[in-house]
Amino acid sequence: MEVKPEIERQEEKKPGGAILTGQGGILFLRPKWLTFPLTIILISSFSILALFLGFFMNYWGVADQQWFNTHQIDTESSIIGRMVKSRQDGIFSDGGLEGLGSLNTTPVFFEEKPFNNQYLAYFTGRSFGAYTTYDSQIGGQGILFSILDKFIPLPPRVKYSLFRALTSLLTAISLTGIILWFFLEFGLTAALSVLASAVLSQWVTVFGRNIAWSLWAFYLPLAVIMYYLKFKRGLMNTSRSRFGVIIFIMIFIKCLFSGYDYITTVLIMVIGPFVYYSLLDRLNFRKFLAGLFTAGLSSCLAILLSLIILCIQIGSVKGSFMNGIDHIVYSFEKRTHEISHTISNNFPTEIASSLESGTTRVLATYLAGTFFDATNYLPCSNPIISTYLLKVRYLYLILLFMIMSRLLYRRGNNWVNENEKQKHLALIVATWFSILAPLSWFIIFKAHSYIHTHMNYIVWHMPFVFFGFAICGLAVKSFIYPLGLPTQMRLKS
């Protein structure tokens, strides 16, 4: 089959005001008014709206409503507590750290679950008699919402809803940036497939509006790196410093607004676009390693700067910079692996058990996690069907992505030019590289994953599931085009 050379958005005027347009030598008729910039605006608007509605109000019903209403309110309550403390004693009181306040003079701790009192104090204007800081992150989101809380002249309950709406919107915008990148690289079908995976994911949905998690900060680095490498990667041939600066800024923003949760996942996630473009451009191995080194060094420097700031914050409360270092070491030890039996005995029973747990068991738990639960729409009394067929598990997705990767590589390349073939190969490799992002957290931070089975499934979407669904969309498209459609209907979508 002879394939025409790729022509970017080639256009030819046709009678009746229509334009024959397309990419990669595949043309289709579109109305004259549907310009490429307008197409971008329409896709972006549709994506933001669909995602926002899901994040803010579970509009699509993909998550159980009770679960949606209560998910991670314990973590979010520390931001509410920070706003009460800021209103009471100033935005940077207690180092600006988020935390939990007590309605009397007796300090409270996370294990006592004083979460409702944080909301009660915020909504009713009450003050804290004591405040216990959470020392494991800078708490930039708490500082940001404290500033907004100070200057927005509305009742607390209204402001709380606005803060959730803002977080939902920022998350929707960040993910839309990623979805739009897939459109620019692969067309509409791939972009809609990624959008569908975000809309249908119960985990992305329940995290999307949480003001403590600020999910947008996890995805912003990926989106920015995607566009930098798409439009400016030629600059890396002469200097990699700009690439390093952008990585540094993005990782620091992530640490500032969402702490160090899933940090290894984010670090690997931002390398995914670099892997993709390195294969697409056939970058030599030496330059590839140099780029990896630049990204790694910049990320480490960003994390180091954020840790120094955190130690200063802790020191302002506890009295010494070393208190901050001690807390960081303690937090790392309790979230990873058992170094020795003596060390694990220094932790509470639950944490000690997590340190001693097997990595294989942890991985099996997360492979069995549910991506999409169809029983929310189709109640079924048969336990076999409802448990194993109507619950789409991450293991199923991995198997699906394997099949679709093979189909795309073998069949999808029969109707495209050499540049598109290289794009498909680069996407397949980048997708299976990206599975290292969630696996890194499950394995390195095994103890954390052992305990936090109520939330860590979200890392499958950083960004492995998104890339996998893009492959599915392209593979399905490879079956649609050869069905004998007229050439003018063969939309690169």
Image: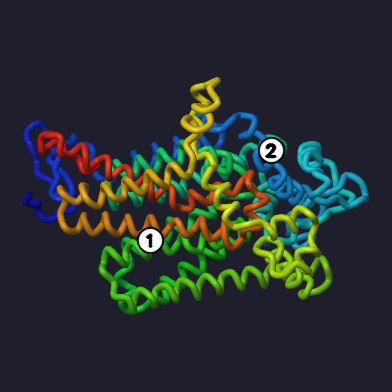
Q: Amino acid at mark 1?
A: Pro
Q: Residue 274 or 142: which is nearer the viewer?
A: 274
**Residue at image mark 2:** 154
* Residue 307 appearing in the image: yes
- Residue 134: where, in percent of width, then height? 75, 57
Which SS class for mark 1? Answer: helix
Tell me how far mark 1 sits from mark 2, CA to CA: 42 Å
Q: How many marks?
A: 2
**Residue at image mark 1:** 273
Q: How many neighbours does mark 2 have within 10 angstroms: few (below 14), some (14-19), or many (20 or more)?
A: few
Residue 340: image quadrant is bottom right
Side of 361 where 486 appears, left or right:
left
Q: Amino acid at mark 2?
A: Leu
Side of 306 where 320 appears, left or right:
right
**Mark positioned earlier in the residue sequence (1 or 2):** 2
On the rendered image, what quadrant is the C terminus found in?
top left
Report the mark closest to the observer, 1 or 2: 1
Residue 74: image quadrant is top right
Vertical placement of residue 385 versus 45, above or below: above
Q: How many neighbours does mark 1 have within 10 angstroms: few (below 14), some (14-19), or many (20 or more)?
A: many
Side of 403 where 89 appears, left or right:
right
Residue at image position (47%, 36%) is: 392
